[in-house]
Image (cartoon, grey):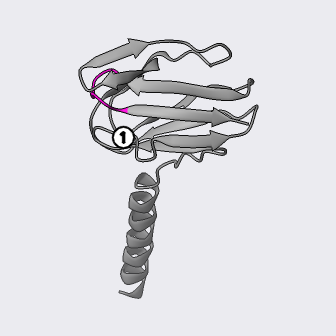
């Protein structure tokens, strides 16, 4: 009788460990500067970083974004423009709830990026 109870507890413990292991997921950690994106905006529209930094863009919303060099000059007119020394963002795509690097920013200056899907969604990166 005690052997059956003991075997039952061992099997229950193994099953618990198996289920717990299945629920473990890898968390990505980012080092360096980050900018979060909401449903239709950059949560911080301007960031100052150091030369040599890579900026990580994090899409916190379940919506897509497409990032390019340039900016919205009005809510209906986006202008693509790569400033000298700016890392090129040629259609960095986000599907929602994901992230991607932008840069490495090796030149000091002010650089502009925008989301082509969301009018007025601009990001200014100041590199010192």
* Residue at x 40% of width, y 87% of height: 2
Most extreme residue toward the front is 74
Which quarter shows the N terminus? bottom left
Badge 1 element: loop
Instruction: Give the residue at mark 1.
Output: 97
Up-down relation of residue 113 to residue 99 (above or below): above
Q: Which residue range is magenta in the image?
A: 116-121
Location of residue 36 in the rendering, given as x and y in whole percent from the top left corner: 45, 44
Which quarter shows the C terminus? top right
* Residue at x 38% of width, y 71% of height: 12
Of residues 24 and 110, the one drawn nearer to the viewer in this rendering? 110
* Residue at x 51% of width, y 17% of height: 89
Location of residue 84 in the rendering, given as x and y in whole percent from the top left corner: 65, 13
Location of residue 119 in the rendering, given as x and y in whole percent from the top left corner: 27, 27
Most extreme residue toward the left is 76
Q: Is residue 64 left or right of residue 50?
A: left
Does residue 119 belong to the magenta stretch?
A: yes
Tell me the chief SS of the magenta region.
loop
Residue 19 in sight from this viewpoint: yes
Q: Quadrant of residue 111?
A: top right
Q: Is residue 81 left or right of residue 41?
A: right
The residue carrying pointer 1 sits among few (fewer than 14), some (14 to 19) or many (20 or more) residues within 10 Å by Cα, namely: some
Q: Quadrant of residue 106?
A: top right
Q: Is residue 61 left or right of residue 25?
A: left
Most extreme residue toward the bottom is 2
Of residues 83 and 67, the one drawn nearer to the viewer in this rendering? 83
* Residue at x 56% of width, y 30% of height: 101
């Amino acid at each position: 009788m005690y052997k059956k109870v003991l075997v039952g507890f061992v099997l229950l413990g193994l099953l618990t460990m198996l289920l717990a292991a299945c629920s473990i997921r890898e968390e990505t950690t980012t080092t360096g500067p980050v900018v979060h994106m909401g449903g239709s905006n950059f949560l911080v529209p301007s960031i100052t970083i150091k030369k040599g930094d890579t900026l990580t863009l994090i899409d916190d919303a379940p919506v897509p974004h497409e990032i390019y060099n340039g900016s919205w000059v009005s809510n209906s007119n986006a202008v693509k423009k790569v400033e000298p020394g700016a890392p090129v963002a040629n259609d960095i795509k986000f599907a929602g709830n994901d992230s991607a690097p932008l840069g490495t920013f090796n030149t000091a200056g002010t650089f502009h990026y925008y989301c082509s899907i969301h009018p007025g969604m601009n990001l200014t990166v100041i590199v010192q």
